[in-house]
Image (tube, rainbow, N blue to C red):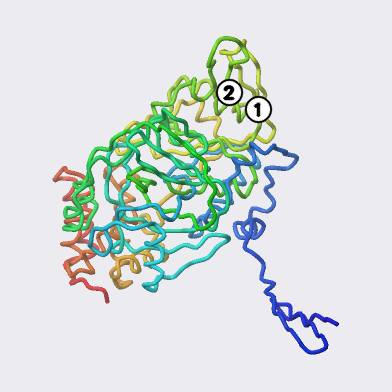
Amino acid sequence: MSSAEEVPGTTNIRAEGDNARLTVKISLKPRFGKENLKEKYKVGKYSLSEGYSMGPSLQALVPKGTPDYVEHGENYVERIMRALYHFKQCALIGPSGTGKSVRGTEEVDVIRNGKRGSSTIEGIFESLKGAGKRVDAAGSWETIRVGRDELLVLSFDRRAGEIVWRSPAAIARSAYAGPIAVVTTATGRKLAATPDHSFVTLDGTVKASDLKPGVFLPVVNTTPAPSIVMAIGGTSALQSGRTIAKWERVVEVKMEAHEGWVYDFEVPGTETFVAGDGIVTHNTHITYLVAELAGLPLWEINCGLQTSVYDLFGRFVGLGKENWVDGQIVSWCRYGGILYLDEANMMKQDIATRLNPILDTRGHMVLNERDNEVIPRHPNGFVMISMNPYSAEFAGTKPLNAAFRRRMTVWIDFDYLSVGSKIAPDEVEMIAQRAKIGSPVAEKLVRVAAEIRRQYKTGDLPYAPSVGDLVNWGTLVADGLTPALAAEETIIALTADDPEVQNNVRRIVRMVVGDAKAGSK
């Protein structure tokens, strides 16, 4: 005979026989899945996939298992979902990234606590976990936040075309069972990643499943000298420790079965890291989370200058109409989902012009290359664009075409946490924790940054410090320098080479921090 007795969060099942009694306790705690995430981000009422159906090939384009996007009251996920629900398109100004995960056995060059070495990604995660770092669990992901002074990895600066040392904000892992793409380059370099993991190519960001022989990937040619990075510890030092990336041709992409953990780094700024035999790959961002919550395929395009009309709209690959191959935008227009245009203000003018009739009330595109075929925009076709602000700071950017700009109904600015008189306690706490300094000192650093950011927004200064810049500054303060002296080696030198601009920043620093002694108390 058997019976069940319920208590909060568990079920006890008893089974009794002639000579034995067995009691089993089963946990009933719900898995933190998509519906829970919708509730967390308050987006349950914004259904973007109502009435939408897709085949297996499109199912593969729907992101899965994306890590949480950490917000501090900005409600970015809700605002994006709301904009897409009501207007079908929106623009994001500020930081972005992309991607999924690589196999845990992939090797990574690191600088850990000042020492250069090499380790597998899973080895780094387990080492941090074993050292007592907190592991945050959400959904299928486990994440460890990394302090600035703990770890540096190689990364690819796409604007400069250089390999640099960068500090990841976090390392994450997720259980994964399924196919994994093993990418091999012409010199035998290999890297294994999940099919939806993104790679940087000459033609933009491409998923592993879409990589083909002949595509070129950036790889490490010569590793930057770590002694330069660690001697100073600030961004100016990172800029000194750079080498030009080498581009290598992909010769094979082979799918293999995989079951186990897959890993990812979160590298702010460059959004890339180097793994395997020195191949550059990409990390995660908010667009993937939105697509996963919506249950829609994501069509991602990097709008760099290498991207042509033929890549995006399609081309003939032989004689005869049957040899036409749709590009990304045409496929999105036919089948629906979210079209994501990254670095939109680097887009070529001929591409922007072709998009205009799709984004306005006409809602269709004319495929001039294929007998002027008129393709209506899918009813579940949504558009997101993202970009850095147009300025000399971001080389290659330009003002958006006015007609294209007007078609983006909602603009969401990913702003700094603290600007002017607005000081965010979350940013103060973050700087204090990551730089290992006291909250009073961290607040002064944030107040300096807030004023510099205010003047940057008004055009009086050419650069505004990021959270990472403040962590660099705070790291030197924790090492024993006064805030004023540490600023000389970090945010003052970073802002500009012009002595007059540096003096303006120096005055802001001294006005807030004076010459007070620094420390971690």
Counting from the top left corner in percent of width and height, residue 437 is at 29, 71
* Quarter where residue 160 is shown: top left
**Mark 1 / mark 2, whichever is N-terminal:** 2
Q: What number of labels is visible?
A: 2
Q: Which mark is residue 326?
A: 2
Whether residue 399 is visible here, answered yes or no, is no
Q: CA distance from mark 1 to mark 2?
A: 10 Å
The one nearer the camera, 388 or 173, is 173
* Quarter where residue 428 is shown: bottom left
Q: Amino acid at mark 1?
A: Arg
Q: Amino acid at mark 2?
A: Asp
Residue drawn at x 47%, y 49% is 284
Q: Residue furthest left?
A: 499
Counting from the top left corner in percent of width and height, residue 228 is at 17, 53
Residue underneath mark 1: 334
384 relative to 508, above or below? above
- Do the CB atoms of the residues marked 1 and 2 lie less than 8 Å apart? yes
Residue 397 appears left or right of 315: left
Residue 445 appears left or right of 325: left
Counting from the top left corner in percent of width and height, residue 462 is at 27, 42
Residue drawn at x 83%, y 81% is 2
144 relative to 90, above or below? below
- Label 2 sits on a secondary structure element that is strand
Which quadrant is the N terminus positioned in?
A: bottom right
213 relative to 270, above or below? above
The one nearer the camera, 6 or 220, is 220
Whether residue 320 is visible here, answered yes or no, is yes
Residue drawn at x 34%, y 64% is 147
The one nearer the camera, 307 or 197, is 197
